[in-house]
Image (spheres, helix red, strand yellow):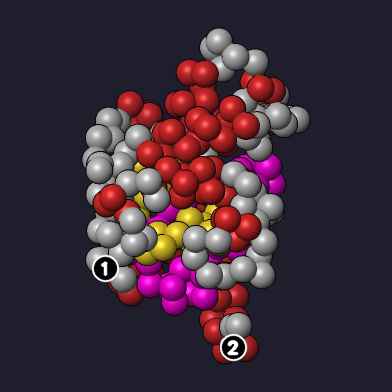
Amino acid sequence: MYSRRLFLQNVFLFSGLLAACRKKDSVQMDDNLLEHNFDQKISFKQDCKLLFIGDSITDAKRDRTILTPNDMNGLGNGYVKEVAIALFQKPAFEKGAIYNRGIGGNTIADLVNRWDSDAIELRPDVVSILIGVNDIRRGNPSDYYYKYYRSILSKIKQSLPHTSIILCEPFILPNIQGYDNFKQNFLDYRKVVRKLAIEFNTFFVPYFSAFESSSQTTAASNLLYDGIHPTNLGITILKDKWLGICMF
């Protein structure tokens, strides 16, 4: 649990970040970011401590009372559980520990607020982050998203310099309600995550690219039933794309 002092420190941090986002000078996002080739592969040590963190897509109705690793109820019913099942079949991960700290409805600011307790204190060897769709739905500008996101990456680099970071690309499809209102901001969010992946030299999972490709031959609702949350087919895509950056 947070102390009152730490809570107030976070409030001041958020206020400062939000004020910075409202300045006229915005973060520049080059269109070429969408064409950048991320080809780094991650490998795991046998006793790797792997943390997944994000919003409802990561949460996937997990039992939040279970904080120990490798419990299927604690890992939820989504891509995290499917990735875990696949990883535990690999000799290179046979002694690994997998944690799920996704919370439905979370925004990037929520992640900042719980970053110490749910990420830093766990001291993971690898942290995989998928966050952003709730910020898009709330209309939070991409500068806001960038500065908050950058703050948590800076913190983990400072506190846990040997922790590897995996940034997952946020995704929506046109069957989301209000898509026309979101699509430009969503494009900017994709650029933000790619910019941060380059800036912090992280691993990167191109999730939207995978869904966009699949939607050419499969109805969007068969991939993301509401344009946001994955169907069983969508979960398989998430799992396969995540495992696609792994080296065993």
Q: Nearer the viewer, residue 172 or 238?
A: 238
Above/below status of 61 relative to 225: below
Name the amino acid, label 1.
Answer: Pro
- Residue that badge 2 annotates: 3
Residue at figure coordinates x 35%, y 35% from the top left: 244
Secondary structure beneath dot 2 equals loop
Left or right: 77, with 191 as reference point: right
Label 1 sits on residue: 161
* Marks 2 and 1, how far apart at CA: 25 Å
* Residue drawn at 48 percent across, 18 percent down: 213
Quadrant placement of the N terminus: bottom right
Q: Is residue 122 magenta?
A: yes
Badge 1: few (under 14), some or many (20 or more) residues near its Cα, within 10 Å?
Answer: few
Quadrant of res 73: bottom right
Q: Residue 199: horizontal and vertical position, in percent?
A: 29, 50
In which quadrant is the C terminus drawn?
A: top left
Q: Is residue 233 left or right of residue 41?
A: right
- Residue 226 falls inside the magenta stretch: no
Region rendered in magenta: 110-139
Tag of residue 217: none
Task: Classify residue 71 by image quadrant.
Answer: bottom right
Q: Nearer the viewer, residue 222 or 81?
A: 81
- Residue 32, given in percent of the width and then of the height, sits at 33, 28
Q: Residue 112, percent across and down?
A: 53, 66
Q: Answer with left or right where residue 49 lies relative to residue 140.
A: left
Tag 2–tag 1 contact (CB < 8 Å): no
Query: Compared with residue 134, is residue 214 higher up or lower down, i.e. above or below?
Result: above
